[in-house]
Image (cartoon, helix red, strand yellow):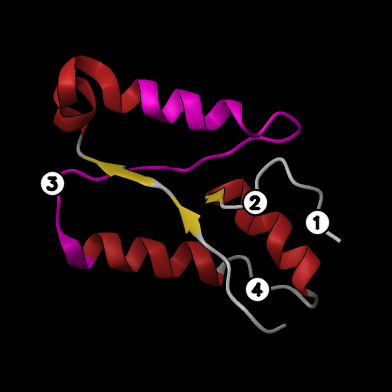
Amino acid sequence: MSGGQVFQLLVATPQGVRAHHQGKALQAYTSMSKRGTSFDIDALLVVDPYDWASVHAALLQRVASCERSTWAESLGCLRAKFFWQYEGVEYR
C-alpha cells in the first residue's frame, strides 16, 4: 500500500492525567474515544515515571502486536490501540 496513515495516542503520567489543565487531558481522551462508536479504543498510555525509552518500547510493542497477514486485519488492530486519522470514514 502506498501512502501513509496517521495514528495517535495520549501519553501521560498518572499525575499528568489528574493535573493537566484541571483534567482537560482526560476530557480530550474522552472526546477522542467517542469518535470510535463501534469498537473500543485503548489509546491512552500511562507511564510512571515518564521515560522516553519506556514510551518508545511500549509504542513498538503496540505496533508489533498488530502484525497480521493483511493490511485490513492490521488496521483493525491498530484502530483499537490508537486514534486513526480516518476514524468515522469507511475504509475500502
Mark 2 and mark 4: span between their CA atoms?
Answer: 20 Å
Disc 2 and disc 3 in contact, CB within 8 angstroms = no
Above/below status of 25 relative to 57? above
For marks 2 and 4 on the same chain, the one whose residue lies earlier in the sequence: 4
**Is residue 84 rendered magenta in the image?**
no
Q: Residue at x 18, y 43 (%)?
A: 48
Dot 2 lies on which element?
Answer: loop
Q: Which residue is mark 4?
A: 67
Q: Residues within 10 Å of mark 1 (few under 14, many from 20)?
A: few
Dot 1 lies on which element?
Answer: loop
Disc 2 and disc 1 in contact, CB within 8 angstroms = yes
Dot 3 lies on which element?
Answer: loop
Mark 2 and mark 1: span between their CA atoms?
Answer: 8 Å
For marks 1 and 3 on the same chain, the one whose residue lies earlier in the sequence: 3
Mark 2 and mark 3: span between their CA atoms?
Answer: 32 Å
Residue 20 or residue 66, whichever sits in front? 20
**Which percent across, then down, holds residue 22?**
18, 15
Q: Which residue is mark 2?
A: 86
67 sits to left or right of 44: right
Q: Residues within 10 Å of mark 2 (few under 14, many from 20)?
A: few
Q: Which residue is mark 1?
A: 91
Tell me which amino acid carries mark 3: Pro
15 sits to left or right of 10: left
Dot 4 lies on which element?
Answer: loop
Q: Which residue is mark 3?
A: 49
Tell me which amino acid carries mark 2: Tyr
- The span picked out in magenta is 27-53
Quarter placement of the N terminus: bottom right
For marks 1 and 4 on the same chain, the one whose residue lies earlier in the sequence: 4
Disc 1 and disc 4 in contact, CB within 8 angstroms = no
For marks 2 and 1 on the same chain, the one whose residue lies earlier in the sequence: 2
Q: Residue furthest bottom?
A: 2
